[in-house]
Image (cartoon, rainbow, N blue to C red):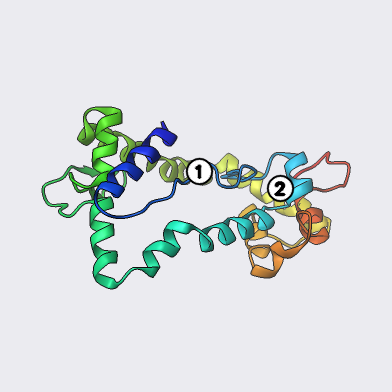
């Protein structure tokens, strides 16, 4: 479905007088989401907290041919290209109230709306359903992290980590410590410090 949508977008944009390159569904296949704690020892041994993967993803974004193409257009042509891709008028398009209370609107015209209408039939229903469900992740995570059992587990995690020389209050703080541009520059994956923090002891019986 993703590839078909990309093909439809390219065809539509070509008809509008613009170019568009296909975007892969998984530009960095090794990239994974760990919403609470890294729980894959093999992955952590190679990537630590994923700083090398984040750096690779950032390089791909910088080298993205679509981004370069849009930036190379004049301001007028760039605005026209964005309107052709995303639509020109949101006031008449579908809207959805998010679980947290915000409202998101989408233009009912443009190549994206056309492609998704071709694929899913009722564009407005598709937009509302996908946008609503995509925004459930944040609510679920907030509820999990607010649970007393989870907070207790994090305290135990932090105590264990401090005992190994890694003074982090929670897994998020550990990840942020390795989110600097320098953190992902180790050749062949995560650096020794990052890998050491994400897997302890080295035999992998405990993982962070």
The percent position of residue 136, horizontal first and vertical second, equals: 39, 40
The CA distance from mark 1 to mark 2 is 40 Å
Query: Circle 1 sits in a helix, a strand or a loop, which is it?
Result: loop
Q: Is residue 107 left or right of residue 29?
A: left
Q: Nearer the viewer, mark 1 or mark 2?
A: 1
Instruction: Name which quarter of the figure residue 60 lies in.
Output: bottom right
| Quadrant of the frame with the N terminus | top left
Q: Closer to the camera, 121 or 49? A: 121
Instruction: Name which quarter of the figure residue 4 lies in.
Output: top left
Q: Closer to the camera, 102 or 58? A: 58
- Which residue reaches farthest top? 121
Relative to residue 75, is residue 56 depicted above or below?
above
Q: Is residue 122 left or right of residue 28?
A: left
The percent position of residue 76, horizontal first and vertical second, equals: 24, 69
Q: Earlier in the sequence, mark 1 or mark 2?
A: 1
Q: Residue at x 70, y 62 (%)?
A: 184
Relative to residue 87, is residue 165 depicted above or below?
below
Q: Is residue 172 left or right of residue 84?
A: right
**In this view of the protein, can residue 169 be seen by the observer?**
no
Q: Which numbered disc covers residue 61?
A: none
Residue that carries the numbered disc 1 in the rendered image: 24
Query: Circle 2 sits in a helix, a strand or a loop, which is it?
Result: helix
Q: Residue at x 39, y 69 (%)?
A: 72
Q: Which numbered disc covers residue 156?
A: 2
């Amino acid at each position: 479905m993703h590839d078909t949508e990309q093909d439809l977008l390219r065809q539509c944009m070509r008809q509008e007088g613009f170019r568009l390159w296909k975007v892969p569904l998984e530009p960095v296949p090794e990239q994974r989401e760990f919403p609470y704690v890294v729980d894959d020892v093999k992955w952590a041994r190679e990537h630590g907290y994923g700083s090398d993967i984040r750096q690779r993803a950032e390089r791909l974004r910088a080298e993205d041919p679509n981004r370069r193409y849009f930036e190379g257009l004049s301001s007028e042509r760039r605005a026209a290209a964005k309107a052709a891709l995303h639509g020109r008028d949101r006031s008449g398009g579908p809207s959805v109230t998010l679980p947290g209370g915000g409202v998101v609107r989408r233009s009912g015209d443009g190549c994206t709306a056309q492609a998704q209408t071709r694929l899913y039939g009722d564009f407005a229903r598709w937009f509302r359903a996908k946008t609503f469900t995509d925004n459930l992740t944040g609510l679920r995570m907030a509820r999990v992290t607010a649970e007393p059992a989870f907070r207790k587990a994090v305290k135990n995690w932090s105590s264990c980590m401090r005992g190994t020389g890694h003074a982090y209050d929670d897994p998020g703080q550990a990840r942020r410590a390795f989110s600097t541009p320098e953190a992902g520059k180790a050749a062949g994956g995560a650096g020794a410090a990052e890998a050491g923090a994400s897997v302890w002891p080295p035999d992998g019986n405990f993982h962070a």
